[in-house]
């Protein structure tokens, strides 16, 4: 299996390219508008056919490239049941997104936003999970807008993501401190927001953050509800 993390420095966003080396079928998770040409060039260089463009949620800090990738490649777009209405396919718990012999299992993990999804993949003996903004490396996504809910976020992390095998490799949608991957076991032990914390303690931590709004919030959320298409489209 091919797995390539791709990084957008401006928004600190990770995009993930997954592909089957035999059939050359590919999936792109959380693409960024400004990186369309980079991602298309990589698909061409590797001889891959993009089947799915998958969103973990409606992002507030960058504009998605989902619609552009759909137009340029013919791929179908995927979002959660509460996600962008423009998506070709809306998925929920237990659904699977197949590429070659592999499939991403959908986990509904709301709390950062009400539409947040994570995707679990078992490939070549290894367990992987793509967590969007739900669980970050030594952190979590915020829960103070887009119908976010810290109690729901805590349950998504502790009851769904922490139920995965400890050696599951964690691939987040963002990192701001130079990390690229972790494991579920590491986050259970070392994540300062959730390790050893009760739900009440977690909620208190989240409510005390008082973070500034994302710089692209006003543009990104409405654009991403349209899969990144312009308002005139």
Image: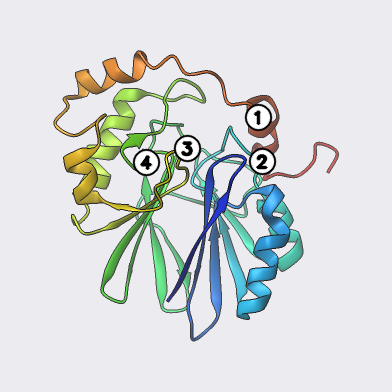
The C terminus, quarter of image: top right
Percent of width and height locating residue 125: 26, 74
Q: CA distance from mark 1 to mark 4?
A: 20 Å
What crowding class fits label 3: few (fewer than 14 Cα within 10 Å), some (14-19), or many (20 or more)? many
- When the figure is inspected, residue 229 is found, relative to residue 216, above or below; the finding is below
Asked if the residue at tag 1 contacts the one at tag 3, i.e. Cβ–Cβ closer than 8 Å, the answer is: no
Residue 136 image label:
4
Residue at position x 32%, y 29% in the image: 152
The residue under the point 68% across, 61% down is 38
Q: Earlier in the sequence, mark 2 or mark 3?
A: 2
Q: Which residue is mark 1?
A: 216
Query: Which of the two labelled residues, at mark 2 and mark 4, occupies the earlier sequence position?
Result: 2
Mark with earlier residue (1, 2): 2
Asked if the residue at tag 2 contacts the one at tag 1, i.e. Cβ–Cβ closer than 8 Å, the answer is yes
Rounded to the nearest angstrom, the CA distance separating label 2 from label 3 is: 16 Å
Q: What residue sits right under mark 3 in the picture?
A: 115
Q: Toward the viewer: 185 or 76? A: 185
The CA span between labels 3 and 1 is 19 Å
- Name the residue: 71% across, 67% down: 73
In the figure, is residue 225 to the left or right of 55?
Answer: right
Q: In the picture provided, is 108 more to the left or to the right than 81?
A: left
Mark 2 is surrounded, within 10 Å at the Cα level, by few (under 14), some (14 to 19) or many (20 or more) other residues, namely many
User: In the picture provided, is 183 more to the left or to the right than 110?
Assistant: left
């Amino acid at each position: 299996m091919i797995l390539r993390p791709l990084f957008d420095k401006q928004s600190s966003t990770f995009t993930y390219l997954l592909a089957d080396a035999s059939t050359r079928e590919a999936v792109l998770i959380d693409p960024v508008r400004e990186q369309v040409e980079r991602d298309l060039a990589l698909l061409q260089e590797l001889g891959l056919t993009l089947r799915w463009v998958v969103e973990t949620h409606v992002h507030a800090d960058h504009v998605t490239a989902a619609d552009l990738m759909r137009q340029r490649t013919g791929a179908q777009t995927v979002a959660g049941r509460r996600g962008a209405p423009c998506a070709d396919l809306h998925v929920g718990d237990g659904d699977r997104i197949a590429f070659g012999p592999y499939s991403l299992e959908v986990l509904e993990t709301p709390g950062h936003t009400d539409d947040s999804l994570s995707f679990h993949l078992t490939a070549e003996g290894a367990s992987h999970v793509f967590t969007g903004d739900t669980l970050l490396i030594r952190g979590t996504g915020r829960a103070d807008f887009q119908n976010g809910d810290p109690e729901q976020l805590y349950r998504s992390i502790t009851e769904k993501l922490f139920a995965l095998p400890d050696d599951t490799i964690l691939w987040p949608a963002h990192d701001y401190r130079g990390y690229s991957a972790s494991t579920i076991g590491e986050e259970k032990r070392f994540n300062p927001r959730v390790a050893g914390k009760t739900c009440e303690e977690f909620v208190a931590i989240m409510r005390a953050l008082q973070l500034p709004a994302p710089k692209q919030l006003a543009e990104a959320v409405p654009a991403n509800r349209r899969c990144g298409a312009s308002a005139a489209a």
